[in-house]
Image: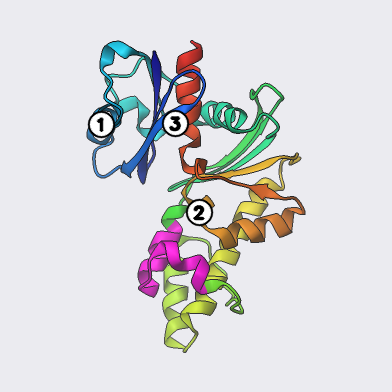
Amino acid sequence: MYSVGIDVGSVAAKAVIFDGKKIVAKDIIPTGWSPKESGLFLYDKIKDSIHINDDQIKAIVGTGYGRVSLPFISKKVTEITCHGKGAHFIDPEIRTVIDIGGQDSKVIKMDENGHVIDFLMNDKCAAGTGRFLQVMAHILEIDVDDLSDIAKGAAPENINSMCTVFAESEVISLMASGASKESIAAGLLQSVCKKTYSLISKLNVEDKVFFSGGVSKNSLIKELLSERLGKEIISSDLSQFLGAIGAAVIGYEK
C-alpha cells in the first residue's frame, strides 16, 4: 500500500508517493491559475508514473495554501506540520527548517520526534520570497535560476526596499544609472538574506538547520544565510518536496 502527499503552493504543486519506507515517486508542476486542476492533474500523473491505482492508496493528504481546493484528499494538514514531519523523515537530527516559498517564508523548530514546537511565518507580503526574486529576475531579463551564478563574486548594490513594487523601481533606477546586472543580482540576494535573517533571528535556531522551498535551490542565498547564522545549513534534492513528503508520511502513519 501507498500514501500520497500533495503540496499545492502558490507557485508550484508538488506530489510524492510513499510506500512506508521510502519515497518511490515525486513530481512537480506549476500551480497555474487553478490549484484544484493542478492538484488533480498531478495526482493522476504521479500515479501513472509507477502504474498504481486508487485501490493501492491508503491515504491522500493535502497541504499548502491550495489544499482547501482538493476534493479528492483524505485529510488536510497545515504546511507547518508537514514541513516538520518531512524534515524528520529526511534526517531525524534536523531541529530547524528555513522555508522560503513562492509567497511566504517560515522558520520552524522541531523536537526529536519531528513535532513542531515553535514557528514564525511571514505571509503578509511577497518580500524576500520566490515571487520577489521572479519579479526582479524578469526586470533584469535573466532566468531566476541564474541569479546565484550571476551574482557570485560581484560587489552588491544596496537595495533599500523589500517591497516588491518599490524594489522594482529601485532596480530600474540602478540599471539606468549604469549598475551591472551582476551587482544588482548580488544586492537582491543580499536583501533577501537580510529579510530572512530578521525572521530567523527571532527564534533560537538549533542545529541541524535544513533549507526548503523553491529558493533553497539558490546556492548563494544558502551560503549567505549560513554565514549570518554562523551555522551550517543543509539542503537536498528533496528540499522543494518537504511539505509533500511530510503529508505522505502523515497519511501513511494514520
Instruction: From the image, tell me which residue sits under label 2.
Output: 217
Measured as percent of width and height from the top left, residue 206 is found at 75, 39
Q: Does the magenta stretch include residue 37?
A: no
Q: Earlier in the sequence, mark 1 or mark 2?
A: 1
Tag 2–tag 3 contact (CB < 8 Å): no
The picture quadrant where one finds residue 86 is top right
From the viewer's perspective, tell me whether residue 101 is left or right of residue 109. left
Tell me the number on the disc at residue 244.
3
Around disc 2, counting alpha carbons within 10 Å, would you say few (fewer than 14), some (14 to 19), or many (20 or more)? some
Residue 167, image x and y in percent? 47, 68
Pointer 3 or 1: first along the chain? 1
Instruction: Specify the amino acid type for callout 2.
Output: Lys
Q: Can residue 204 be seen in this view?
A: yes
Alpha-carbon span between mark 3 and mark 1: 16 Å
Which element carries disc 3, helix, strand or loop?
Answer: helix
Residue 144 lies within the magenta run: yes
* Residue 18 screen position, x and y as percent: 44, 23
User: Which quarter of the figure has residue 189?
Assistant: bottom right
